[in-house]
Image: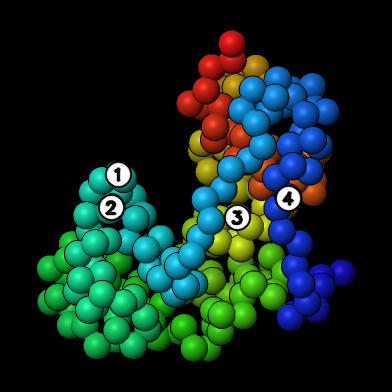
Amino acid sequence: MSPAPGKRQPTLRPARAHAALMKDPAFGPWVAHIGPPRLRRVTDPPFHYLARAIVYQQLAGRAAATIHGRFVEAVGGSVTPAAVKRASDEALRGAGLSRGKLAAVRDLAAKARSLQLHRLSGLPDDEVLERLSTVRGIGPWTAQMYLIFALRRPDVWPVGDLGVRAGYARIHGLAEVPAQKEMSALGEAYRPWRSAAAWYCWRVLETELP
């Protein structure tokens, strides 16, 4: 049964997740080498975080950062629903937003009040996913990244992320990357720390064991 809205939701405990995954035969050596999960602390308000997530979609890091910087300038330096509503289409398109991303940030601004973004931290994971998925341009992956990095939820398993699936394959010495349907079942072994397991899957793709 899901916790009632407004109740304190569980958060990722890096030390506990590290200790739990250390016991796994496949994850253990990688976890010991990499150390506890290190998630950057998110300080942006929910609206700004989600708007940036939309801007960054399908772009390389430097190009995304440049366009996001121009987007912030186009809305007057403060990324709020009101500022996005005030900005003209010409200004936002001039900042580098595609038509699809322009429509998405407009939709986010229009729905921000009804979504009650400031209250998402008090909702269980499935309700956060349901609410965010009503916004154009925010699919399961973006919503799951919000859960992991902004809300620091401990048990999110983004099976649609190719990096997570590729990292899992490397950790387990698999010849092929598991399909999304397979990954859903494979992740059950790592409850309640699947967010940390996903984080290690990303990290092993850039790590070599000694």
> Which image quadrant is residue 34 in?
top right
Q: Do the numbered discs 1 and 4 sit on residues whose CB atoms are within 8 Å?
A: no
| Mark 2 or mark 4: whose residue is earlier in sequence | 4
Q: In this view, does 59 lie above or below 85?
A: above
The image shows residue 116 at horizontal and vertical percentages of 56, 84
Q: Name the residue under label 4.
A: 13
Q: Mark 2 points at which residue?
A: 64
* Left or right of 189 in this view: 78: left
Q: In this view, does 28 lie above or below 154?
A: above
Separation of disc 3 and disc 4 at Cα? 12 Å
Q: Which residue lies furthest to the top in this view?
A: 210
Label 1 crowd bin: few (<14), some (14–19), many (20+), radius 10 Å: few
Which kind of residue does numbered mark 4 sit on? Arg
Secondary structure of the residue carrying numbered label 3:
helix
| Mark 1 or mark 4: whose residue is earlier in sequence | 4
Separation of disc 2 and disc 1 at Cα? 6 Å
Label 4 crowd bin: few (<14), some (14–19), many (20+), radius 10 Å: some
Separation of disc 3 and disc 2 at Cα? 21 Å
The image shows residue 122 at horizontal and vertical percentages of 69, 75
| Mark 1 or mark 3: whose residue is earlier in sequence | 1
Front of the two marks 2 and 4: 4
Which kind of residue does numbered mark 3 sit on? Ile
